[in-house]
Image (spheres, helix red, strand yellow):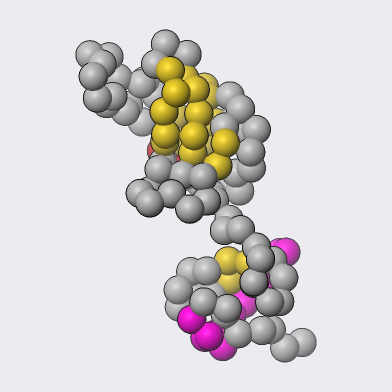
Amino acid sequence: MSLPNCPQCASDYTYQDGALLICPMCAHEWTDGDGADDTPVIKDAVGNVLTDGDSVTVIKDLKVKGSSTPIKVGTKVKSIRLIYDAPDDHDIDCKIDGFGAMKLKSSVVKKA
């Protein structure tokens, strides 16, 4: 079986991992052969794929600007929304009880 080249960097070293095709050269992941209209896959700190509406748990204390109390380890965040084209690394939009609406990085959460 011949796998398609990476749609981002045109590398021919792509490999398949379950339903995903992965390029080891640029770390691009996609599900179909053309890669033209798929959205990127966002994973949590341990590698679980996140989707809109998931609940996640914070895995480390997070300082919050303008607040004297940090978000503690183990804080559960419900009904997340993923941001695929964020200009910074914050790819989760959510509302945390006691703190309000904010953005988080997927590298500091674990799927609950």
- Quadrant where the N terminus lies? bottom right
Q: Which span of residues is magenta-colored?
A: 9-21
Residue positioned 63% across, 38% down in the render = 52
Secondary structure, magenta segment, majority class: loop
* 16 within the magenta span: yes
Residue positioned 39% across, 16% down in the render = 99
Q: Position of residue 29 (x, y in %)?
A: 58, 66
| Number of on-image labels | 0
Residue 20 appears in view: no
Q: Position of residue 92 (x, y in %)?
A: 49, 38
| 27, above or below 42, in the image | below
Q: In the drawing, does residue 2 fall left or right of residue 90?
A: right
| 1, above or below 18, in the image | below
Q: Position of residue 95 (x, y in %)?
A: 49, 22
Q: Position of residue 102 (x, y in %)?
A: 41, 28
| 22, above or below 1, in the image | above
